Amino acid sequence: MRLRAALPEDLPRIHDVRNGTAENRLDNPALVTPEEVQWYLREGVFLVAEDEDGVQGFTCANPQTGYVWALFVIDGKHGRGFGTALLDAALRRLREAGHRQSFLTTGAGTRAADFYAARGWRAMGRAYNGEIVYRLWL
């Protein structure tokens, strides 16, 4: 496995990864704008994890706020360390940017919620859309 910064030419595969997950489906693609994606490419932490078959996961985090906007690994590649490696790298970059805590949201009762809880993230309440807000002290 190799981690690296996402490149514009990775976006089609990143789209495949984002839509290749059974949980946390993006039911309304309009919720992720091209402008947001371009901002993360230019200004944010936008990393991909790849193996010999190509990109298998990605993460985006905001170095201005400490928010982890996205972390996805394509179905069939879970449990192989992609998610942990991506999250650890993103959190390292947020610490380097001066953050002492990070936060994210995800659906209640999901594999993602279990993944974050097992890594020390704590539920802090609910977001306006009903997802659980998690915080981690860095």
Image (cartoon, rainbow, N blue to C red):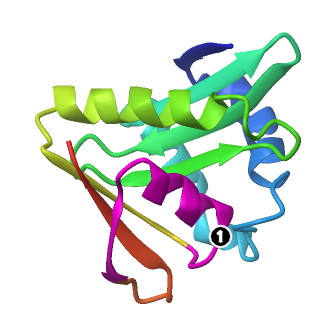
Q: Quadrant of residue 96?
A: top left
Q: Quadrant of residue 48?
A: top right
User: Split into 4 quadrants, where in the image is the C terminus?
Assistant: top left
Q: Which stretch did the figure color magenta? A: 107-125
Q: How many marks?
A: 1
Q: What residue do we see at 41% from left, 89% from top?
A: 128
State left or right for residue 121 relative to residue 57: left
Q: What residue do we see at 72% from left, 27% from top?
A: 10
Q: Nearer the viewer, residue 52 or 60?
A: 52
Q: Quadrant of residue 9?
A: top right
Q: What residue do we see at 30% from left, 27% from top?
A: 92
- Residue type beneath disc 1: Thr
Label 1's element?
loop
State left or right for residue 45 relative to residue 95: right
Q: What residue do we see at 88% from left, 17% from top?
A: 53
Instruction: Identify the residue position indicated by label 1 in the image.
Output: 110
Q: Position of residue 124 (x, y in %)?
A: 29, 76
User: Split into 4 quadrants, where in the image is the N terminus?
Assistant: top right
Instruction: Determine crowd level at label 1: few under 14, some 14-19, many 20+ residues with C-alpha closer than 10 A.
Output: few
Q: Position of residue 12 (x, y in %)?
A: 80, 36
Examine the rendered structure and indicate whether residue 67 appears above or below residue 4.
below
Examine the rendered structure and indicate whether residue 35 appears above or below residue 11.
below
Examine the rendered structure and indicate whether residue 72 appears above or below residue 48.
below
